[in-house]
Amino acid sequence: MAEKKVVKSFLWGALAGAVTGAVTALLFAPKPGKELRKDIADTAHTVGEKTVELGKKAGSTAQSIVKKSTNWAVDIRSKLGRKAGEDEAPTEEEETIAQ
């Protein structure tokens, strides 16, 4: 849960920084108002698309990490159980998590 908050905070910060930088650069460029507004809209659209792409990558990476850590925990638990003399099959919950 904490990882989602970190990723979400990073994405909002990146989005805010990108938009602020882009708008500042465009406002200081010597262009007519109509052209400037079009450039701002185009830049905002591009930043939005890149933010969505970055969010998807971060989400898939987080899911991958969770799945690997869950598999690792199930594996360690089963090895520790065997060392203690328990030869029981994984529970239904462990099998569901491992998938």
Image (spheres, helix red, strand yellow):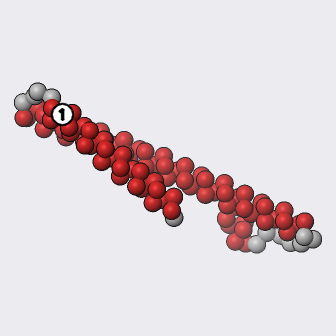
Residue under numbered circle 1: 26
- Say how many tags the image has: 1
- Residue 8: image quadrant is bottom left
- Residue 40: image quadrant is top left
Give 36 or 28, whichever is nearer the viewer. 28
State the residue at coordinates (71%, 58%): 71
The picture places residue 66, in percent across and down from the top left corner, at 61, 57
The picture places residue 3, in percent across and down from the top left corner, at 51, 58
Amino acid type, mark 1: Leu
Asked if residue 88 can be seen in this view, the reply is yes
Is 16 on the left-hand or right-hand side of 83? left
Whether 63 is drawn above or below 57: the answer is below
The picture places residue 86, in percent across and down from the top left corner, at 89, 72
Is 91 on the left-hand or right-hand side of 35? right
Whether 46 is drawn above or below 62: the answer is above
Is 79 on the left-hand or right-hand side of 70? right
Whether 40 is drawn above or below 2: the answer is above
